[in-house]
């Protein structure tokens, strides 16, 4: 596997982060998201939007509690995780963070990158004084649900339904990191 690790994303990582996100979504979401919205979310126009958002996350995060981390293997970005203070109205953003995304490039899955990203995220969030983390996961994304549940996360009862040409349910998972 070579040299692996997790570090804060840098400006020069933005293109690789965007490509990783798009590849991971195309591969990981294809079995449960409708084809047309997924194509829109991963198309060229969307890619430019994601690239701009990731660059802003790296060069001008809203606070020091907003972070984008990357998993690297032999110097190449192979995964990403982003977190921030939670914004859901039923949680305290002073003590609850949200894991916005955790993605590993499909060609680099099952090599520990997701676990390293999750562990690094927890370490940063503890340092920042958070005691709980929440994240939203597609209810049919069994791989992600299984991964997080095996790491001690569980559904907290919150859910939402997105209109993607048909209803697509998401569930919120939470874990205590205190």
Image: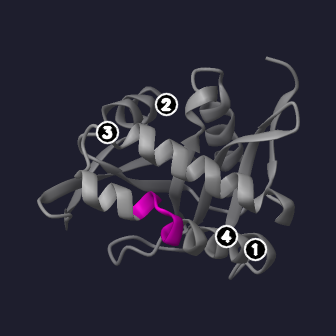
Residue 88: quadrant of the picture:
bottom left
- The residue located at (67%, 70%) in the rendering is 66
**Disc 2 marks which residue?**
151
Say if the magenta span includes residue 15. no
- The residue located at (66%, 68%) in the rendering is 54
Can you say whether 74 is above or below 166 in the image? above
Q: Position of residue 97 (x, y in %)?
A: 54, 63
Name the image quarter holding the N terminus: top right
Label 2 near label 1: C-beta < 8 Å? no
Say if the magenta span includes residue 45. yes
| Colour convention | one colour
Q: CA distance from mark 1 to mark 2?
A: 26 Å
Mark 4 surroundings within 10 Å by alpha-carbon count, few (fewer than 14), some (14 through 19), many (20 or more): some
Q: Position of residue 133 (x, y in %)?
A: 50, 54
Q: CA distance from mark 4 to mark 2?
A: 22 Å
Q: Which mark is residue 77?
A: none
**Disc 4 marks which residue?**
66
Q: Position of residue 136 (x, y in %)?
A: 37, 55
Question: Foreground residue, 39 or 124?
Answer: 39
**Disc 3 marks which residue?**
141
């Amino acid at each position: 596997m070579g040299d692996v690790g997790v570090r804060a994303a840098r400006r020069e990582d933005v293109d690789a982060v965007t490509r990783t996100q798009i590849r991971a979504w195309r591969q990981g979401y294809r079995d449960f998201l409708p084809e047309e919205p997924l194509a829109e979310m991963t198309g060229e126009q969307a890619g430019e939007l994601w690239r701009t958002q990731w660059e802003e996350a790296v060069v001008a995060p809203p606070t020091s509690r907003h972070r984008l981390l990357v998993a690297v293997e032999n110097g190449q970005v192979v995964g990403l995780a982003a977190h921030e203070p939670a914004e859901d109205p039923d949680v305290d953003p002073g003590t609850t963070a949200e894991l916005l995304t955790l993605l590993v490039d499909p060609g680099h899955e099952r090599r520990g990158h997701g676990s390293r990203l999750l562990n690094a995220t927890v370490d940063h969030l503890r340092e920042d004084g958070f005691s709980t983390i929440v994240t939203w996961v597609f209810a049919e994304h069994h791989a992600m649900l299984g991964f997080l549940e095996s790491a001690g996360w569980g559904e907290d009862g919150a859910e939402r339904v997105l209109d993607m040409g048909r209803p697509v349910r998401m569930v919120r998972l939470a874990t205590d990191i205190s």
